Image (cartoon, helix red, strand yellow):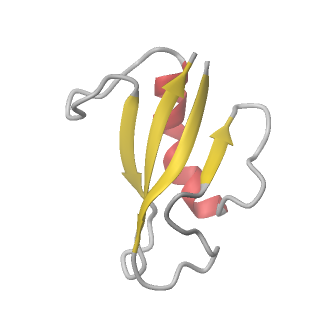
Amino acid sequence: MKVIARVISQKGSCEAGHRVGDEFVISPVKTPQGLCPWALYTLFPFAETLEFGGSFPWEKEPGKARVACPDPDNPVVFELRRED
């Protein structure tokens, strides 16, 4: 299974230049080119859970998670989704 991270919201000025619609494949083997390292550190535990079949009880759809980057002044929100 793979996990796709898609930017669904971006406010302020993202230093990495992420914009709504950007997508990244998250893999335990390779860092996605162009993905902010701070965002990756935040997304990784959620992506690992999804990759191995887990889900989160607060999400409406299994196989998905919404996660915000750690910059409180310029938040970027990602939707992670598991693909078989």
Q: Seen from this angle, which residue lies furthest front? A: 21
Q: Residue at x 40, y 18 (%)?
A: 54
| Image quarter hosting the C terminus | top right
Instruction: Please tell me which residue lies in front, 18 or 39.
Output: 18
Q: Residue at x 38, y 32 (%)?
A: 64
Instruction: Please tell me which residue lies in front, 2 or 39.
Output: 2
Instruction: Please tell me which residue lies in front, 53 or 4.
Output: 4
Q: Is residue 60 above or below residue 83?
A: below
The spot of residue 45 in percent (x, y) is: 50, 37
| Image quarter hosting the N terminus | top right
The spot of residue 46 in percent (x, y) is: 46, 36
Q: Is residue 73 above or below residue 21?
A: below
Count of marks overlaid on the render:
0
Q: Residue at x 65, y 39 (%)?
A: 26
The spot of residue 49 in percent (x, y) is: 47, 26
The spot of residue 2 in percent (x, y) is: 62, 25
Q: Residue at x 69, y 33 (%)?
A: 27
Q: Is residue 78 above or below residue 25?
A: below
Left or right: 27 as drawn, with respect to 57: right
Q: State the image quarter where residue 39 is shown.
A: bottom right
Left or right: 44 as drawn, with respect to 55: right
Q: State the image quarter where residue 72 is shown.
A: bottom left
Left or right: 12 as drawn, with respect to 22: left
